[in-house]
Amino acid sequence: DSSSTPSQPSKQPSKQPSHSLNPIVADVKPSKTVEIFSLVKEMQAAGETVTSLCVGEPDFLPPQAVLDATVAAVTAGDTRYTAVTGTLELRNAIAQDLHRRKGVQYNPANEIVVGNGAKQCVYQGVLATCGAGDKVLVPAPYWPSYPEMVKLASAEPVIVQTNADSGYLITPQDLRATLESHPEIKLIILCNPSNPTGGVYHLEQLQAIANVLQDFPNVLVLADEIYERLVYDGDCPSFAAVDGMFSRTMTVNGFSKAYAMTGMRLGYVAAPLPLAKAITTIQGQLTSCAGSISQAAGVAALTQVTDKELEANVQIMKQKRDYVLEELSKIPNVKVAMPPNGAFYVLPDVSAYFDGDDAQLCLELLKAKKLAIVPGSSFGAPGTVRLSYATSMEELGMAMKKLKEFLEEQNLKEP
């Protein structure tokens, strides 16, 4: 019958695609600092006022010469791809700076690779040298990304605990014992000055490490020196400058911390030719070059900003460090065994609170006082918290007031 309605096909429930992820992702922890920072931004977007000491980002603007060079690059239409390894002008400036201040000589043509921030350079250094079956020595406390980058390269991190008595620096004895018990170790990651402790390896300590490494000729070193211009007392030499270490060292540095260029995402790795070539190959397939405008700003940072200008920022940071240490000393049961001598972090021991559960402390603090700090357990230092004092004195004053109030309230709750 032509008037009859044709039957409608029955609707089948649509199948959801099966998201089969690389198993390696399941083994990698998200960055706790990024998680907390994201939560802070969400709270601020919802209209809440949050005080944050969780991100290592200077509160001052980049130097005027850097800002001027950025504007000039935009105005000149300097917006094209550069060589994968960066502009020759920037690589020349980096090579000259390393030679002038650190006494190390790199060929700017093929031994320096400019990347999108020091973080990318660290990962590419790990990826270029390590893979399945290899191990990487990471002293703790550590920057949380180090062990996760090692896992992403299919290698295995070997965590070596340090303690406050040694300034949170790895000792030659512990280094030797670890290398002897783990012959698969191919790389050591050495952060100097340290994030999160602010500990600094001076020349004598670096030489002691180098003396051990002479007995392990196949072990490479990734020297993350991003904070090397933020040292309050004494020297902070490049590990590559220590006798016998140049040929096995990848030196990572950048512009985020000393020059306050965090959002411009500009870093570099300087390494002997075989290592630099491998890193270049990886970067060529991942991101290609760093931003051309950021690179122009980087040239200005290295060629137009004076040491005196940077030293003024270091003195301001030192005043902030001293203020935070003074305020922490007034809080019962909070200990700073080793005052930081570099970078802009302090890692106080708060294990007397919340039964040593630093993550719970940070969560309750954020809820009760709208103050964001990072749990030390994510840095391999349970029972501590990391405070970044790279913010304004006004913000620091508010943060220390909130922290003191919160912990004093916890003391009152004790039976």
Image: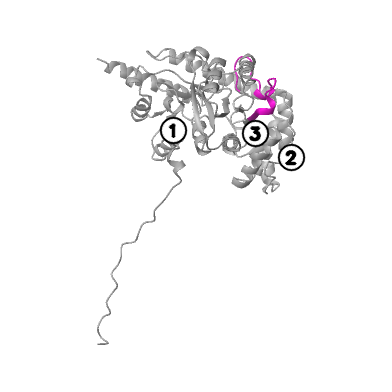
Counting from the top left corner in percent of width and height, residue 140 is at: 49, 23
User: Outermost residue, bottom direction?
Assistant: 1
Mark 3, residue position = 269
Q: What residue sits right under mark 1 in the picture?
A: 32
Of circles 3 and 1, the one toward us is: 3
Say if residue 169 shows up in the picture: no
Residue drawn at (31%, 19%), measured in percent from left and top? 410
Q: Position of residue 209 (x, y in %)?
A: 61, 18
Label 2: which residue? 88
Q: Seen in the image, is 219 located left or right of residue 27?
A: right
Magenta-span inclusion, residue 299: no
Question: Rounded to the nearest whole Å, what is the CA distance between mark 3 and mark 1?
Answer: 25 Å
Q: In which quadrant of the rendered image does the C terminus lie?
A: top left
Q: Between disc 3 and disc 1, whose residue precedes?
A: 1
172 is higher (above) or lower (below) than 270: above
Q: Quadrant of residue 221?
A: top right
Query: Left of 279 or right of it: where is 108?
Result: right
Labels 1 and 2 touching (C-beta < 8 A): no
Q: Earlier in the sequence, mark 1 or mark 2?
A: 1
Q: Residue 50, position in %: x, y?
A: 41, 31
Please tell me which residue lies in front, 257 or 59: 257
Q: Viewed as shown, does residue 333 lie left or right of 269?
A: left
Magenta stretch?
230-251
Where 116 sits versus 184, above or below?
below
N-term mark: 2 or 3: 2
Q: Secondary structure at mark 1?
A: helix
Circle 2 sits in a helix, a strand or a loop, which is it? Answer: helix
Q: Position of residue 351 (x, y in %)?
A: 37, 18
Residue at x-position 74% and y-position 35%: 108
